[in-house]
Amino acid sequence: MVVLVPMARVEIIGPKNRFFEAVSLLHEQGKLHIEDLTKKIGSGEMPIDKMDVALGQASERERMEDLLIRVRAIIKALQLPGAHIDEVARQKEYLKLWKLESGELSDEVVKIIDEVEERTAALAQSQSEIENEISLLGRYEPILHKIQPLARQIVTTGAFDSVALLIERRYKGLLEQLKEELDTITHKQCDIVSTDVDEDTTAAIVVFSRTYSVPVHKFLAMENVNQIRLPSDMQGLPFDQAYDSIRERRKTLPDDLKAVRLELESMSAKWYLRLATVRDVLTDKIDEIATIPKFGQTEYAFVITGWIPASDLSELESEMQASFGMDVIVRQLEIDEKDFENTPVALKNSKALAPFEFILKQRGTPRYGTLDATWMLFVFYPLFFGMIVGDIGYGLVMLSIVLWMRSKFKVNEGVQLATSILGPACTAVIVFGVIYGEFFGNLLGKEYFNVIRPLTLGWLTLPFNRVEFVQVFMVLAIGVGVVQILLGLAFGVVNAVRTKNKHHLYEHGGILTFLVAMAIAIVIGVFLGNLGGWTIWPLLGFAALSFAGFIYAIRGGGIMGAVETIESVTGMASYIRIMAVGLGGAIFADAINQIVLKTAGGVGNISAGGLVLGIVVGILLHSLNLIMSAFSPTIHALRLNFLEFFGRFYEIGTTEYSPFRKTGGEGQA
């Protein structure tokens, strides 16, 4: 069984005059998860004082934080260079900047900022303004285009104002009512000209005396009339002139935007590497100062405690010995089960299993000392997904899409993660498609089962048609559920032993004993009862064992132990959803094929036109079923794993392993 990465708890003690050297070494090594001693010192658990940040260090941190904000703003404005960033050059630049004293580093960063900040900010603002203007004018142009036939007929003078409206044609009659209301407001110094611009829209221009401009606009606003409001810099222009101005402006804006972006690209190529390195150095310097209050001190010594992977402990001891000799002592502390809850957790899995860590963490970080459930998701998620969908055709389409996305989006981490999870699931769909004999439903026909050599496993013969043999499919689904829940309870027992939790041991062990003994008693009673009276004694023995397991479940979990025992039995039945959802998709696929056949003309009457139409209908409906098959099975597969399976053993911790580590010039781009 796979367990989480074994951790060692260490205490580092040394003279205060070597404190900053020790912190720098730990930062460089990047393996120690720092334990914050603040609470333990405050509660009196550790009779030492909290390490203080010197006044000069506090001001240095504030200064560097201000500079970091400015550097990040510049990086955000620039564009990631298209060419690959030279990591060797960045590492070299990082080491150069890291060796500078605090004041020298600040001066160097300010010098860099002064060279690029103002121009970068101006270019970024210009880019944003041009993009917004393109978007804004793109909305206005088609609207103004619709009212041009009217706008060119209207000639307004300084004594008159105008408003353009767009209304749905079915409400065109309301213009007469609008005219009556406006005549009242303007004392009949108003006119409305309208025309249909398309089958759904009517455009209207209202011309009225400028004397009544305020009440007219107020009235239109209160009535929620759909007015066409020009951009602020065109408010005084007639609509036809505004339209011409917008068209001309839209012609020049793309060239303006291109020029701004080219200059930003040029600046990125020149400055991005150095700015990214400055960001990393400032981040690391700030982290070192920010970490100081987490440590402890006495009058003459410093105290650092933390967690490190057990395999890296010897390396830490060797480096401390080489740098400080006997001045600094590294001591491994004992880890009690009471410490497990706060022990940082690190997962270490193979490349194939690593993507499933993302799904696992949605449940929560596992508690230290328990089993790593990543491999369980790797096995059971594809298994359930494949059992539900189980179609060769759908599986091939899904797998093709997954492979295409992996090839198309090689640098997109999200896509690579998702496809790494879906790849095994799609493969399982194909495997179960072979078992069920399904290729886009029943396209293979009954002949498939005569071609494939049958495999007999006791009462089960593979392949089998799950639509016809529903009972077989149901038994398989429940059987998988029984195996997974019993496995979950067994893992719960293992976790209880590892964490020395007596109550969980009694509860999970009792439920497991109850279920296994009860199952054996039922088998003896049903299948071996005809062998004679000798079966009564083992039957009674396993029944008694089952009862004892139930008592221990209650002893470990109280009333919840009884509830969990019953819920474990009902939980097995919930795996019927594998059959129900899978059967629904298979029947839908078969129904689609029947629709296609009838659309094509039926058996013996298929025409060329009907065949083409049938194929089109089939593609559309199978695509719909494919989409449903991609989402619904995922939900049910995750539900069964998270609720029914993980609920038997998975314990959530509070802390994820996060080592005190430098970016080392290799921070994120």
Image: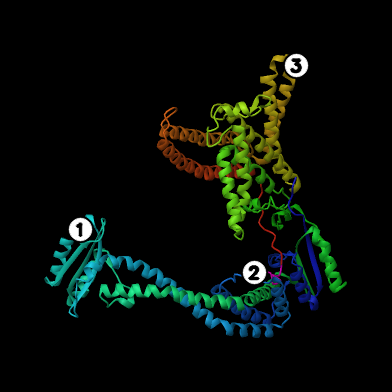
Report the amino acid beneath label 2.
His
* Image quadrant in which you'd find residue 450: top right
In terms of image quadrants, where is residue 77?
A: bottom right
Identify the residue under disc 2: 84
Q: Is residue 479 above or below residue 180?
A: above
Where is residue 192? Give x, y as percent: 17, 67
How many residues crowd around disc 3 within 10 Å: few (fewer than 14), some, or many (20 or more)?
A: few
- Real-space Cα separation, disc 2 to disc 3, in angstroms: 78 Å
Which numbered disc flags the more N-terminal residue, 3 or 1? 1
Residue hosting label 1: 172
Range shown magenta: 661-669
- The spot of residue 318 in percent (x, y) is 85, 67
Amino acid, disc 3: Trp
User: Which residue in the structure is indicated by mark 3?
Assistant: 534
Q: Main secondary structure of the magenta part?
A: loop
Is residue 327 visible in the rendered image? The answer is no
Q: Give the foreground label among 3 and 1.
A: 1
Residues at discs 1 and 2 in contact (Cβ within 8 Å) = no
Res. 29 image quadrant = bottom right
Q: For the residue carrying disc 1, how many other residues have a C-alpha within 10 Å: few (<14), some (14-19), or many (20+)?
A: some
Quadrant of the frame with the N terminus: top right
User: What's the distance in space between the residues labelled 3 and 1, CA to CA?
Assistant: 94 Å
Q: Is residue 405 magenta?
A: no
SS for callout 2? loop
